Every structure is written in C-alpha cells, then in structure tokens.
C-alpha cells in the first residue's frame, strides 16, 4: 500500500481552528453557547474549537448510530438513525460540531430533532466539508476545510476501521489497497509522520 498522504499539517489545522473560533466568538457575541459534539469523529475538532471560542459555553456529546429496521407494516427494511442522549435545547443557542459532513443525512436528522425542542438558534461546524457527497440540501455554517474528492480522510479524530484517528494531521490513502491489507495501513503511520 502507498504511504499516507498528508493533506493538512497540524499547524494548518490549528490556524483554521483559531480562525473559526474567532469568527464564532464574533457571531455569537454576548451569548452563551451550547456546543454539541458528535462522537466519535467530532471530539478532537470540538476539543480544539471550544478552546478557541471566547464565550461562556456548555458542552455536550451525542453518539449516533444507523440501524437496519424492518417496517412492521410492509416487512421492508429501512435505515433509522438513533442517538443518545437527548439534548435539552429549549431557548438555547446550539452549535452542532462534527468531524466531517458528507451525505448530510445524519446532520439533517439531528438538526430537525434538536429543532423540535425549541432552541433559539442552531448552527453547524465541521472540520471537513465534502459537498460532492451530499444527499440532502445542507451547508455547514462553519467549516475548516472543504474537499471535492471522495477520498477517505483520516487523522485529527477521523478514523478508518477504528484506526488512524490519533494522527496529528489530516491525511488520506489508497482505499482499495487498504481494504486488502488494513494492518499495513497502520504501519505506514510512522513513515507518513516523517514526511
């Protein structure tokens, strides 16, 4: 397998997070922010982002899961999104934070669910925006990086098969080669760091 390719170095990521933090601090001046991070992909980005925002805030985490469910009326299978815990959103200003926005289906679902609880305002922030993969009409309010390709992005909290989320940079690799040998993908980590 080819070595991991670095897309954004730690310094580039830190700079963009600082810029986002400054923008969010200006946009929500004199407000208390409730930051909701999606696990697992959003936690590293959220940890850095909340420290770059100069506002009073509370933070929360939710976990989502997509399951195949059989419709009792038709017997057909369909996908349903589940999440825990429920967020108390009434009269709050909420910033929903995730590592990557791809299809937008889960984020759209969460925005609708949170909206049912009467928040003052709900905005979204993502580390990576991939508009070319969108299946619903949705644009993030804030994003660090936008990518046109559908390559797998790893590092900075984003993992592939549970691996590589600990990399300090955002990178990519040859997915076809990695599917044939995921263990070798892990061994390329040290080589990619040196580049």
Image: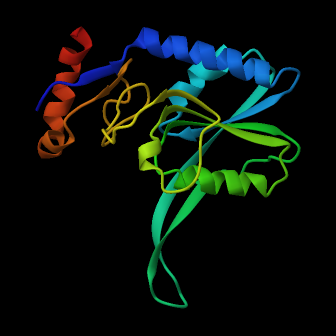
Percent x, y of residue 135: 48, 56
If the image is split into quadrants, where does the C terminus sit? top left
For image coordinates 18% across by 16% down, the residue present is 191
Above or below — where is 67 with respect to 180?
Answer: below
Percent x, y of residue 126: 55, 33
Q: Is residue 66 visible?
A: yes
Instruction: Give the side of residue 89 with respect to residue 176, left or right.
Output: right
Q: Residue furthest bottom?
A: 73
Instruction: Give the side of residue 46 with respect to residue 23, left or right.
Output: left
Residue 177 occupies quadrant: top left
Q: Is residue 84 visible?
A: no
If the image is split into quadrants, where does the N terminus sit? top left
Colour basis: rainbow
Instruction: Give the camera-side residue of 145 and 191.
Output: 145
Percent x, y of residue 19: 61, 14
For image coordinates 71% across by 23% down, the residue present is 24
For image coordinates 70% across by 19% down, the residue present is 23
Above or below — where is 34 with respect to 47?
Answer: below
Instruction: Give the camera-side residue of 71 and 136.
Output: 136
Above or below — where is 2 with respect to 36?
Answer: above
Instruction: Give the camera-side residue of 85 and 50.
Output: 50
Residue 18 occupies quadrant: top right
For image coordinates 44% across by 40% down, the residue present is 130
Percent x, y of residue 98: 55, 37
Image mark count: 0
Residue 142 occupies quadrant: top right
Instruction: Give the camera-side residue of 130 and 60.
Output: 130
């Amino acid at each position: 397998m080819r070595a991991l390719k670095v897309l954004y170095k730690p310094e580039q990521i830190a700079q963009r997070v600082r810029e986002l933090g400054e923008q969010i601090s200006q946009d929500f001046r004199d407000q208390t922010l409730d930051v909701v991070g999606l696990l697992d992909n959003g936690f590293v980005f959220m940890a850095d982002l909340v420290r770059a925002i100069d506002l009073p805030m509370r933070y929360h985490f939710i976990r989502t899961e997509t399951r195949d469910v059989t419709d009792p009326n038709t017997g057909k299978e369909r996908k349903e999104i589940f999440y825990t815990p429920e967020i108390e959103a009434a009269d709050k200003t909420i910033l929903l934070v995730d590592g990557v926005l791809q299809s937008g289906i889960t984020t759209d679902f969460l925005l609708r669910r949170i909206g049912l609880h009467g928040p003052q305002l709900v905005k979204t922030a993502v580390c990576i925006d991939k508009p070319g993969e969108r299946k619903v009409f949705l644009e993030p309010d804030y994003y660090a990086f936008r990518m046109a390709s559908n390559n797998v992005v790893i590092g900075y909290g984003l993992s592939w098969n549970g691996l590589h989320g600990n990399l300090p940079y955002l990178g990519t690799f040859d997915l076809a080669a990695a599917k044939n040998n995921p263990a070798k993908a892990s061994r390329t980590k040290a080589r990619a760091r040196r580049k």
